Amino acid sequence: MVDYHATPGVPRPMGIIGPDGRYMEQEDDWDRDLLLDPAWEKQQRKTFTAWCNSHLRKAGTQIEDIDEDFRDGLKLMLLLEVISGARLPKPERGKMRVHKINNVNKALDFIASKGVKLVSIGAEEIVDGNSKMTLGMIWTIILRFAIQDISVEETSAKEGLLLWCQRKTAPYKNVNVQNFHISWKDGLAFNALIHRHRPELIEYDKLRKDDPVTNLNNAFEVAEKYLDIPKMLDAEDIVGTLRPDEKAIMTYVSCFYHAFSGALKAETAANRIRKVLAVNQENEHLMEDYEKLASDLLEWISRTIPWLEDRVPEKTMQDMQQKLEDFREYRRVHKPPKVQEKCQLEINFNTLQTKLRLSNRPAFMPSEGKMVSDINNGWQHLEQAEKGYEEWLLNEVRRLERLEHLAVKFHQKATIHESWTDGKEAMLKQKDYESATLADIKALIRKHEAFESDLAAHQDRVEQIAAIAQELNELDYYDSPNVNARCQKICDQWDVLGSLTHTRREALEQTEKQLEAIDQLYLEYAKRAAPFNNWMEGAMEDLQDMFIVHTIEEIEGLITAHEQFKSTLPDADREREAILGIQNEAQKIADYNHIKLASGNPYTAVTPQTINSKWEKVQQLVPRRDIALKTEQDKQQSNERLRLQFANQANVVGPWLQSKMEEIGRIAIEMHGTLEDQMTHLKQYEQSVANYKPNIDKLEQQHQLIQEALIFDNKHTNYTMEHIRVGWEHLLTTIARTINEVENQILTRDAKGISQEQMHEFRASFNHFDKDHTGALGPEEFKACLISLGYDVENDRQGEAEFNRIMAIVDPNNSGMVTFQAFIDFMSRETTDTDTADQVIASFKVLAGDKNYITAAELRRELPPDQAEYCIARMAPYQGPDAVPGALDYMSFSTALYGESDL
């Protein structure tokens, strides 16, 4: 128990009782004769005052007289707070003696709480300004807070400090430290300590043993200027004293010990922080690169998809062909670089995650919408839009081709019909029967019957014209308004012709009874000539009709139909001769009976000259049709050769791609040799696959020829160019991912110090339990693998908990599968050490001088400029009770580096 109230003025021994309970005298070789030595007291007073001020200046104050300035206990309590870093009870601010005694007692209570048992030191002596007691108390504080923790090879504090001095000065001539008094009189020992740690500050070889004052002053000035150790001794006092005061020397030397040991700790701490910050800065650069590459790729995808989803049709075939060419250029020029960027993005992401795991950092989470899965979803949407756009383009080409054919057919039939109807309306409105003879009337009736027959024959053409117009409307033909107007005009005129025909027939029938029958030969001629004339017009129309085919079978069908038509020509020729024979027979009868015939047949406008002219036209059109069909047949045969050429190449490339995909799957599972050998083998394999690219390019050229020829199907192969492209891109991506996996394994091996034999053992264990050769283990397979490696994960409660802990590490996304890379990361983590947040916090605490905060000046002094500014920009202001202006919180910054809190 502390004796605070011993009788004043009675001398008593001073000492401390250490944590082990043993009493330790403050001076083993205490010389009672020196108690009243003025030189001894002067040295202690100056040294202890300087030592106290070296700490009190941190609180912005100092003492002038060690006896007087500690009497009220205020600065004594402040000194203890500064050197211990702890908070003492609130002092009493009164000026009375009892207030001062209470303050001093609070300080003595705090000293006692630190394991020091004070003997013969009371608060009254300190308050009364007892010089010896005050100096004894300060010496006790110095022993406890500056010397007691010094230990070298398990020695006591004093012996440890002496042993440290002996070891540090051993290489220096004329220095032999055996104690803390006369061994230091010549000043060489002080200079040797400084030179040992900071050789650039002392020119030791120029010092002379016979000039102690110069030596001592040199050491004191250098220590104060460069080591921040205040001058606690006077050279003249030490030289002029038979034996310098041991406490003063020990106090001063302990400052050197703490200064140099703190520098070593600061250097170690700075190195650790530099290493951690360098890793963190590199990872941030990788994250920024990923974000930029992901943003660029997603922006390109978002810009391309609307273009692919644009389904605005073109009006002409030429415009649609331009769209098709633009799409081919996109496939050939614009998309391949983006495929490479997507692959590189996934590789960069995997490499970054591996580096974060190796440096014990949290996994990188990209910005919202920029995950690898988001990019894959966007890419899938792009390919779906691309596929739909290509199908739409081809359908539009077919539609426009059909529309052009129908439009030409419509106008051709309309022109023929309009040519036939020209003048028919005026003819039907004639009143010629009013003044005609009976013979004329009968002729007019027969003629009208022939016209009706002709009109009925033209009914099919009108219906065809209307049907074609309807189909053009349904297919959204761009010139539909003009087509509809022309069709409506034809239909309206047809209705008028029908009405006029009916009206004229009624008029003729009214007067029929007054007319005689017309010559039967003319009538027969008219009845047979009109259908034959219609047949010839239909034949000419069919022979000039456009046709469109896509296969060799279709053109052969047209050729067959044409041959059948040609086989009917002899019968038609006989019919023509028979019709002309009727006309000739009538002429013979008229000549025989001397009858003067009117010019032309009264029953029909179809003259023998007309029949012969149209027959000659039919004879000319047949060989032209032969040539057109033969040309189309040659074209379809050429298309068939293109189909076969593409199919032969595709039927080789397709199976080759399938075999290579199976082969790379086996290689990824069955790789042997060192990781570098595996990397070399994979690079060679990648190059061999890349050498196959000319075959893909050749197939692309053949595919382009097929598209230019408007070939839409190929029965000779099941492979399309789209299948080949997707297979080729998938093969290249799989090889790149396999190479990236091996690169990450090399990073893991080098960073974690895993030997090649360990890596082989891990691979063998993993492959042994990968029964289905998928390159990943299911939960049960992984559990069996862990058991084989000695992990206790059996089906008891403790084993299940351990297995669930491991699964949370290797499968954080709960995918149900453990990849080989995750397996390697786990095994390496189990066997290697990494930096932790606590280690970094401890390092910062050293740089801060055991404070709970650090300043910008301290960071700039201990760290490289870029890393110092990095920390200053990210550290939050310190908010603790001991905060000072400019204080920074290094604890929250350190935990944030390891994902334990947010910056």
Image (cartoon, grey):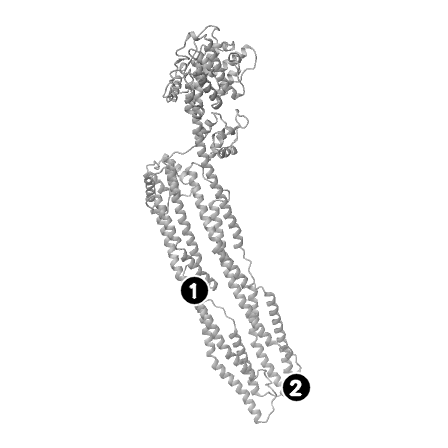
The percent coordinates of residue 493 (x first, y second) are 62, 73
Label 1 Cα crowd, 10 Å radius (few <14 / some 14-19 / many 20+): some
Q: Residue furthest bottom?
A: 593
The percent coordinates of residue 689 (x first, y second) are 38, 53
Q: Which of 528 and 622 lies nearest the eye of the viewer?
A: 622
Tell me the SS state at disc 1: helix
The percent coordinates of residue 596 (x first, y second) are 61, 91
User: Upstream in the sequence, badge 2 or badge 1?
Assistant: 2
Tell me the SS state at disc 2: loop
Against 475, is 172 above or below? above
Circle 1: residue type: Leu
Circle 2: residue type: Ala
Quadrant of the image for the N terminus? top left
Q: Is residue 504 left or right of residue 869?
A: right
Name the residue rendered at 52%, 10% in the picture. Answer: 127
Residue matched to label 1: 642
Name the residue rendered at 36%, 50% in the picture. Answer: 684
Q: Which of 64 and 711 lies nearest the eye of the viewer?
A: 64
Against 845, is 576 above or below? below
Alpha carbons under labels 2 and 1: distance apart:
71 Å
Q: Which of 348 and 472 lies nearest the eye of the viewer?
A: 348
Label 2 Cα crowd, 10 Å radius (few <14 / some 14-19 / many 20+): some
Residue matched to label 2: 436
Q: Is residue 476 left or right of residue 171?
A: right
The percent coordinates of residue 86 (x first, y second) are 49, 21
Instruction: Evaluate whether residue 502 shows in this view.
Output: yes
Q: Are marks 2 and 1 in contact (CB under 8 Å)?
A: no
